[in-house]
Image: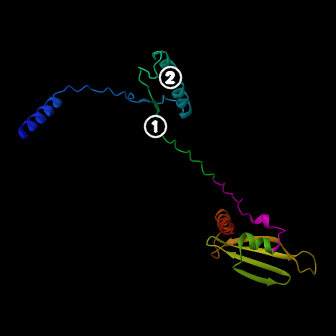
Amino acid sequence: MRHLYFYLFGFAALVAACQPVTPTIVNSKATPAITVAAEGQTDIDLVVSTVTKTADGAAGSGSGTESGSGTSDSSEETAIAAIPATPPVQPTPVQPVKVQPVKVQPPFRPKAMIGSASIILLRDLGIATMVRQEGPIEIWQYSFAECVVDFFFYPVSQGSSKLVIKDWDMRSAVIGDRVNEGKCLAAMDRHHQKLIARS
């Protein structure tokens, strides 16, 4: 009797295993469509076009529904707004550096010193190599490789302590040689320009 139960149980299990299985159809959403931004289209334009497309699809899906049915036969399409690639960074134009023009000082001319006070000569030629006094007259001597230049200061008026340049003279650095006026003037101007550049 016990063996009979085992046979019946095994037969029932076999019959149950041989029953055909009906596949269940699962409705899933379609693969999302990726929308790529066209050239020149901004993120805002892309989102607006995506929303419009989705709204049109929803309106069209309503016509495909069966009457009395709560589901739709057509699959719902989801549009994903793709972020456009970052545009290449444009190089920032380099602003040209404004170069301040170099002020060219006029050349030094001894004749222009006539009537000037000692402070002007100090500014333009610096401290004299030698200063000597001859009565009321004061002589400032400047020695260069090319020549020796003397500036003569006289009182502005008789008995005045204020001195101004009344005359100047140049001679060769070597006694007995002729002075080259062009080279002497150039030497004074070079010395003047160096002093101006330092100030």
Left or right, 27 with respect to 62, comes to: left
Give the main secondary structure of the magenta stretch: loop
Q: Secondary structure at mark 2?
A: helix
Q: Residue at x 46, y 22 (%)?
A: 70
Q: Secondary structure at mark 1?
A: loop
Query: Which one is nearer the viewer's eye here, 65 or 34?
Result: 65
**Label 2, label 1: how far apart the Cα atoms are:** 29 Å
Left or right, 51 with respect to 125, comes to: left
Q: Is residue 136 above or below residue 178?
A: below
Per the image, the residue denoted by label 2 is 58
Per the image, the residue denoted by label 1 is 85
**Quadrant location of the N terminus?**
top left
Query: Which one is nearer the viewer's eye here, 16 or 125?
Result: 16
Expressed as whole percent of the image width and height from the top left, the position of residue 137 reads 83, 80
Expressed as whole percent of the image width and height from the top left, the position of residue 165 reads 82, 72
- Residue 142 in view, yes or no: yes
**Image quarter for residue 158?**
bottom right
Q: Nearer the viewer, mark 2 or mark 1?
A: 2
Q: Residues within 10 Å of mark 1 (few under 14, many from 20)?
A: few
Left or right, 107 with respect to 136, comes to: left
Give, as a single range, the part of the protein colored magenta: 99-117
Residue occupying the far front of the picture: 1
Q: Is residue 106 magenta?
A: yes
| Image marks 2 and 1: residues in contact by CB distance under 8 Å | no
- Residue 41 in view, yes or no: no
